[in-house]
Image (tube, grey):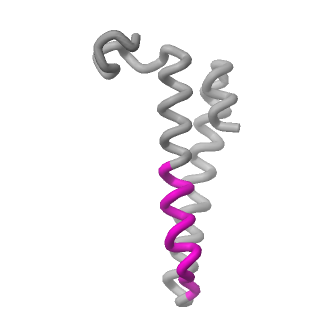
Amino acid sequence: MVGYFLVHDHHVAALGLFAYAGITDLVDGYIARRWNLQTVVGTIIDPMADKLLMTIGVSCLAVNGSIPGTLCPQGTN
């Protein structure tokens, strides 16, 4: 959803979802550490989900042309 909103110039909705994802990730991590509910699967999947969200966000902003040319490698913009 974040990628869709970014590509279609709904930046406020994308920011809201991105913030929601960050807040829920923070709360989830706090609960897991506070009550010692950490699992092997959680320690693998959570960082992967974070990286996927960042990759989708940056990719969609690049496709949209929202990233300045000075941040893109030569010839890709």
Name the residue at the bottom extreme. Answer: 36
Pick whichever, 37 or 23, lies toward us.
Answer: 37
Residue 47 vs 38, above or below: the answer is: above
Pick whichever, 25 or 74, lies toward us.
Answer: 74
Give residue 60's quadrant in the image.
top right
21 sits to left or right of 62: right
Please provide percent x and percent y for residue 27: 57, 68
Q: Residue at x 66, y 24 (%)?
A: 10
Total labels drawn: 0
Pick whichever, 28 or 57, lies toward us.
Answer: 57
Q: Which secondary structure type mostly characterizes the magenta part of the structure?
A: helix
Give residue 46's quadrant in the image.
bottom right
Q: Residue at x 53, y 35 (%)?
A: 57
Q: Which residues are magenta?
A: 37-51
Let me know if residue 38 is in the magenta part. Answer: yes
Please provide percent x and percent y for residue 9: 63, 19
Q: Residue at x 55, y 45 (%)?
A: 53
Quadrant occupied by the C terminus: top left
23 sits to left or right of 58: right
Give residue 13's quadrant in the image.
top right
Residue 21 vs 75, above or below: the answer is: below
Pick whichever, 21 or 71, lies toward us.
Answer: 71
Residue 61 vs 24, above or below: the answer is: above
Residue 77 vs 5, above or below: the answer is: above
Name the residue at the front extreme. Answer: 75
Please provide percent x and percent y for residue 63: 53, 19
Please provide percent x and percent y for residue 15: 58, 36
Let me know if residue 76 is in the magenta part. Answer: no
Quadrant occupied by the N terminus: top right
